[in-house]
Image (spheres, rainbow, N blue to C red):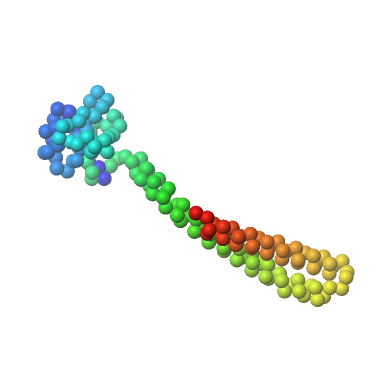
Amino acid sequence: MFRRLPPFPVSEACESITSRPDCTAIWARATSKIELCPRVPQSSVRKFQLSTSRSTPLCYDESDDVAAMRVPIRQFLAHVLPAVARPLRILWNQVIGFLFLVLALMAAPRLVRALREFDGDLRSVFEVLLTAIFLLVMGGFAASSFWRAHKLSRSG
């Protein structure tokens, strides 16, 4: 993105700002600070300040500073991720609730059959008890997931 120009002395910076139309700001390394040209507005110089380790000016068509893109990307993600994550969490809770509900409903016919075939022995009691516990746990998980999705959709 930024094209590196050959180094030039600070004294030539003011003359070269009009002679280089592809470059918008002139940078020079002199006494560990940026020398300002009177024809360059102060606000535009602040926007493009670089570390003092650079000895050559930069233009817009080349860049060697990858870290400069980290801040805009971080700001973009800070704005977009919360807006995307909340609906995804709601959808996730609804899908999980549906799966638990399907598991609970799959156990319901077996519980009805176990109750009809109940004859009082230990195996029948165990079968009814385990099927009922499974149905209640899966139904509870389904209700909890749907309730969480409902609370998320109402908040914020």
The answer to which image quadrant residue 97 occupies is bottom right
Tell me: residue 122, above or below residue 16.
Answer: below
Tell me residue 144's x, y (percent). 63, 59
Q: Quadrant location of the N terminus?
A: top left
Is residue 131 visible in the rendered structure shown here?
yes
Front position in the image: 72 or 56: 72
Q: Residue at x 53, y 58 (%)?
A: 154
Q: Residue at x 64, y 62 (%)?
A: 143
The answer to which image quadrant residue 109 occupies is bottom right
Tell me residue 76's x, y (percent). 38, 49
View extreme (top): residue: 31
Is residue 57 visible in the rendered structure shown here?
no
Q: Is residue 153 found left or right of 14 in the rendered image?
A: right
**Number of marks:** 0
Tell me residue 42's x, y (percent). 22, 35
Q: Residue at x 66, y 67 (%)?
A: 103
